[in-house]
Amino acid sequence: MPVHWTVSHPARLVVAVAKDDVTPADIEKYFAGVTADGAMAYAKIFEITHTPKALNDENLKALGERVIYYAQHGQIGPVAIVAASDESFAQAKIFAAAAQVKRPLAIFRELHAAREWLDAQPVPPSTHPG
């Protein structure tokens, strides 16, 4: 599976790592999994440094529109995208421009900086039963 993620309910954090060839269907599985885990409102780190240019601009824009859909149907949390390579950074910028919703989103070159930024963001109260 090209996108792996873990959900920490105590930390209210989702950490996802994308590797190799990632398709829009892989990202949709991630969205569905995070939603099923009740973690869409959690803070998220999404690491895309190790993905070749698998998603074209059109797919990135479509995924951004999907985020807008999720935002209209519930709360979504802040997102820190980690994109150390120039190619992944460019992809992250296209996605961010297409996913214009009311929530903090930032792109970083380093995981540590992303985590520091996320830790400084306000996170909505928990709605998860556990």
Image (cartoon, rainbow, N blue to C red):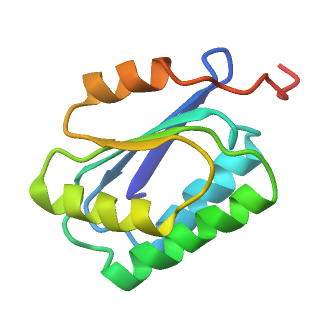
Task: Compare residues 121 and 19 and report the one nearer the observer.
Answer: 121
Task: Compare residues 45 and 2 and report the one nearer the observer.
Answer: 45
Circle count: 0
Figure quadrant of the N terminus: bottom left
Q: What residue occupies the far bottom of the structure in this picture?
A: 58
Q: Is residue 16 visible?
A: no
Q: What residue occupies the far right of the structure in this picture?
A: 129
Horizontal and vertical percent position of residue 121? 53, 24
Q: In the visual, does 2 lie left or right of 123?
A: left
Task: Compare residues 49 and 106 and report the one nearer the observer.
Answer: 106
Horizontal and vertical percent position of residue 104? 52, 40
Q: In the visual, does 50 lie left or right of 95?
A: left
Q: Is residue 116 visible?
A: yes
Q: In the visual, does 12 lie left or right of 85?
A: right
Work out whether 82 lies above or below 12: below
- The image quarter containing residue 60 is bottom left
Q: What residue occupies the far left of the structure in this picture?
A: 86
Q: Name the residue at 31% across, 80% down.
A: 56
Work out whether 55 lies above or below 42: below
Q: Name the residue at 83% across, 19% down.
A: 130
Work out whether 48 lies above or below 82: below
- The image quarter containing residue 38 is top right
Q: In the visual, does 73 lie left or right of 4?
A: right
Q: Name the residue at 33% across, 80% down.
A: 57
Q: Name the residue at 60% across, 62% down.
A: 67
Horizontal and vertical percent position of residue 27? 50, 63
